Every structure is written in C-alpha cells, then in structure tokens.
Image (spheres, helix red, strand yellow):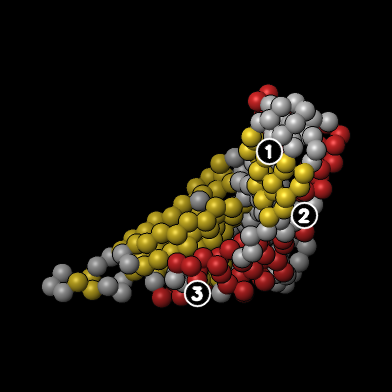
Amino acid sequence: MVLSLLSLNVRGFKNVTKRKAIFLYCKAQVNVNCFFFQETHSSEEDLDFWKSQWGNIYLSHGSPRSAGGAISLHHFDEGHWLMVNIEVDDTKYILVYIYGFNNRTKNQKFLTNINHKIINWKQMFAADKVIVAGDFNVVPDENPDRHPTQHNSPRFNKIISEFSNSLDLIDIWRRQNPNKLQYTWNNSQHSQRSRIDYWLVTSNLTSSTLNSFIKGRHIHHHTRLILDILDYNQIIPQEGLRLIRTRLFV
C-alpha cells in the first residue's frame, strides 16, 4: 500500500469560495491520503466549520493575515469499514466490518481498496483466516437473494464475485443453504426483501465446523447474522475433545 502526501501553500483559507474550490480539488485526488496546507490564516473559531466541510482536519493557528497551517486526512470511506486482527488459541483472524455504498461505482472502488488492505494485513500479521461481514448493500445472487426477482437462473453480482474470488472468500450461509430463500432486509411494506447482509470467510476456515444463521425478526428492516466457529481439531490428552466456540454477531 502506498502512502501519498500532498503539500500546498493556499495563501489564505478565509475566503469561502476559494476554500471550497481547494477542498473540492483535494477530494478529487483519490490517490492522496494526507494533505499539508500552509498559510491557512486560521483561528480557533474556524475549526468546527472547516471540519464540517472537510472532515478530519487539524489546525495550527496563525493570524488572520499570515501563517497558520493544517494537516488533513483524506477518508472517503469513513464509517464504511473497520478491520481488526485478533488471536484466539494461537490462531490469527482478520475481522472486517463492511457497510457498502448504494452506488455501484463507489462500491467497486471501495471493495478494491478493502481487498488491498486485507492482502497487506495478511502479510503484515502472518494471518490467513479472514472473516468479512456486514451490510454490503448488494445481493450476491439476484435470483435467490432478492424478492421479487427478475431472474430464473443464477445472476451473480460481479463486484462481490471478484472481491470473493480474489481473496478466496466463501459466502458461508449460501454454501450451507444452497436452496433456501431467506432474507436479511425488507422494506416497510414487506413487498421487497433481499439478502444484503452476509458473512464471507476464507476457504481455510471450512476445516473448522462453521454454523451460519440468519436469526430473529427484522430490527429496523434488518435481521441478525450469527456465525459459530467450532474447532474440533485440538485434542487434550486424558480430557478428550476440546471445543473452541467463537460466536460472532452482526
């Protein structure tokens, strides 16, 4: 992963039109992670308003006519993902929370970015077991995963398929329930339903016993997802079978 930085002397940020134009220009620099601004001419009262326009911006104030600086972090996907590395009984897992966009182009860029981050973390932490879960805002297959559907045969979502294939991820609930029609979201009238919330796990986790469930009534139009990982591979002498149970909820 490349960390890309950009430095710019803005010669004053007080003018609303000028500041907006610079912010829009910077937000268009999709490969830049962090910006350094000089001569912002900022004061304490500017902070909240500038944050509302940009997001993560940190100011060092000068005078209204000179000096002042800022560092700004460039995050388009705030609140849409979270990734943690955990270790359970000497086994490392990368856990990834996903909240997808309703826009196809944004989702493609978003999942491509997550793909790169997961690959990087797998190398960094020497972890090869990955669990991705959340509300992807797209169904894996338009035929069984949406009601009403316009398709009589499988119609896999290309973005999800490419994301899964590149990381060797399996839609574990569908693997265990190949013909079942069950949904995780419905509209207020219950006239539309879809399975947009799901678990994707690396194939090496299928050596463990996995139980995946869609549980309970819809809460705010979504149901709960539960994944149980039951590892029967560790035997304790004279104690027989050891059960390691990890329960994850979304």
Residue at coordinates 41% horizontally, 59% vertically from top-left? 86
Image quadrant in which you'd find residue 16: top right
How crowded pointer 2 is (Cα within 10 Å; few <14, some 14-19, many 20+) is rated as few
Q: Is residue 100 left or right of residue 28?
A: left
Tag 1 and tag 2, C-beta contact below 8 Å: no
Residue 29 tag number: 2
Residue at coordinates 67% horizontally, 71% vertically from top-left? 162
Dot 1 lies on which element? strand
Three-letter code for the amino acid on which mark 2 is drawn: Gln
How crowded pointer 3 is (Cα within 10 Å; few <14, some 14-19, many 20+) is rated as some
- The residue wearing badge 1 is 69
x, y percent for residue 91: 36, 67
Tag 1 and tag 3, C-beta contact below 8 Å: no
Residue at coordinates 69% horizontally, 46% vertically from top-left? 36
Q: In terms of depth relative to the viewer, which is nearer, 161 or 127?
A: 127
Mark 3 or 2: the one toward you: 2
Q: How many marks?
A: 3
Mark 1 or 2: the one toward you: 1
Q: CA distance from mark 1 to mark 2?
A: 20 Å
Q: Is residue 81 left or right of residue 131?
A: right
x, y percent for residue 212: 47, 61
